[in-house]
Amino acid sequence: MENAFKEKRDLIFAFKELRLQGMETEEEPIKEVPEGLFIKCKYCGESYTKDELQNNLYLCPHCSHHEPIGAYKRLEMVLDKDSFKEINKDMHSNDPLNFPGYQKKLQKQEEKCGIKEALVTGTGTIDGIKTAIGVMDSRFLMASMSAALGEKLTLLIELAEKEHLPLIIFTASGGARMQEGIFSLMQMVKTAQAIKRFSDSGGLYIAYLTHPTTGGVSASFATLGDITLAEPDALIGFAGQRVIEQTIGQKLPQGFQLAEYLQEHGFVDHIVSRKEMKKTLSLLLRLHQGGQEK
Amino acid sequence: MIEIEKKIEAIEQELAELKTAEDSEYKKVRERQLINNKEELMQAMKKLSPTDKVAVARHKDRPNVSEYIEEMFEEFFELKGDHYFGEDESILGGLAFFHGIPVTVIGQKKGKTLEENLRCNFGMPNPEGYRKALRLMKQAEKFKRPIITLIDTPGAYPGIDAEARGQSEAIARNLAEMSALEVPIIAVIIGEGNSGGALALAVANSVLMLENSIYCILSPEGFASILWKDASRSKEACEIMKLTAQDLLGFGMIDAIIPEPLGGAHRDKKAAIKAAEAVIYQELEKYRALSAAELREQRYHKFRSMGQ
Ligand SMILES: [Zn+2]
């Protein structure tokens, strides 16, 4: 039994190698698949239709591989119906370095993804419990950290502190927004210190790490949760794999920097599949209600 | 060495050779010509390009943290290890007197000789380095000592073990904890300040940069490789990244620039360190006058407003 599990895991790891090679690029191409047509899973090689994928929370019906999903789709899966109230929807990058070609790139991303930044924030309820929630969307420039993204997230954290709400952040990021240089870097401090204040005020912060959570995001708010959850086989790490390989001059071990690896090394409380996502968050919120008053 | 310096050195060499040559009309004319050329180059050194500055910031003879500690502080007492996992020589830290005031000083060290380079991992800290720094900073807070950090790193180490031991968490923790410390923190970028690996020591009340140091999201080589998939375009990256002290002061990302001797700190180490000492002392006195709560607020609001 254990062996069978191990075999499956090795197989999944092997498939993942494929995906990791495509990391560190800025954009993950979104392939629009026509209805009814078969899609071949990159990991197990089996085929399924778009409908089958949608009806299965965007998990491969055969191997349960978690396909990336957009922020609104995630919110729909997690929050009670119609409970989401979005804030700061129109915040967008103002190109602080006047970086050549960047404005145009942003425009294209907005048209493609239907959002102005790689993060959607607001409040909603999970089984009736109100929470502040932010979801990063890796379709938009690999959800790299822009000044606008850092500001938007900080405003969410401040709202949670002010209204004494729990805070849930679904992280995903390829790292820094190169085109914003130092402005991107400083968002690490801005968000980390906001989390610290929120935490010192007694607020509960659940970090839910999804594929990929790397670079400046993993080295700031993503790793500061009271409770850290991760989606199965999400890539989580500070340095990019290509950079590490070049630095140490050797191949990386199988499964390196995946959620399971992070858990083995003591940085993730639970790996939670999308099917258990709402249930788990609901339980955690309930477990944090009614703490002893001073 | 930067291009201009190479040219100056060539001129100086020729001048020295001429000196021993027999007197002649040619010698006189040539000497005058060379002296003029040198003067022009010295003038040009006042306006180094960002690419030149990157070279100066990485210069092998640029004063490093050990030299600063030696020159600026008295009775340095080193403290080692994170007391959880290990010791990381790429971060040097300890206690010392600065102008008679007990302080905690923490700096990143690349090493000068190959042996030192290897021991210091070329200035790329592992998680235990950051955790050691945090341990020392928390102690500083407990004993109400100001903290001075000296930053010089190509970045946090990108390695298997560093990831396994939580490089991300170590950096994130430092950012969060530093933001709430109740003692003055003065951070000085003395050479390279690359990425989160530098930032993890730079959440300070006052962030200072030496005139020719650089502070950026990652190395120009890494930048070019990620953005254009071509590390050889690093020169182009230098010019576009806005990584000089002058750029960053303009953006409000740093608080002051420490002037360097003409051509760079390596050309007159003592003068460079003296200039740094004067500005650090001035900033320290400013922040020593604030209460614990004021220190926290000033630091918090400074970073809160960046990129707002
Ligand atoms: Zn599959």
Image: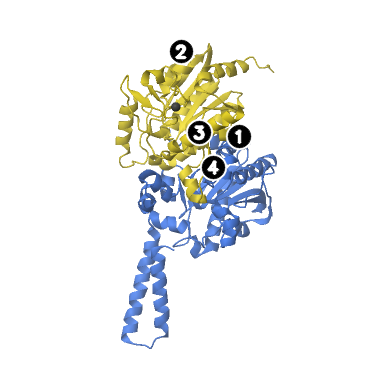
Q: In what element is the residue under mark 1? A: helix
Chain (yellow): A
**Circle number at residue A83:** 2
Chain (blue): B
| Three-letter residue code for mark 3 | Leu
What whole-number distance in Å separates the C-alpha atoms at marks 3 and 1?
18 Å
Which of the 4 image quadrants contains residue B69? bottom right
User: In front of the other: label 4 or label 2?
Assistant: 4
What whole-number distance in Å separates the C-alpha atoms at marks 1 and 2?
36 Å
**Circle number at residue A11:** 3
Considering only order in the chain, which callout, 1 or 3, is on the residue closer to the N terminus?
3
Per the image, the residue denoted by label 1 is: A264
What whole-number distance in Å separates the C-alpha atoms at marks 4 and 2?
43 Å
Which residue sits at x=44%, y=58%?
B55
Q: In what element is the residue under mark 3? A: helix
| Picture colour scheme | by chain
Q: Position of residue A250 (x, y in %)?
A: 51, 49
User: In front of the other: label 4 or label 1?
Assistant: 4
Q: Is residue B174 left or right of residue A51?
A: right
Which residue sits at x=51%, y=31%?
A233
Q: Position of residue A207 (x, y in %)?
A: 54, 27
**Circle number at residue B31:** none
Q: Is residue B206 visible?
A: yes
Quarter of the image with the N terminus of chain A in it: top right
Per the image, the residue denoted by label 4 is: A253
Which residue sits at x=42%, y=51%?
B221
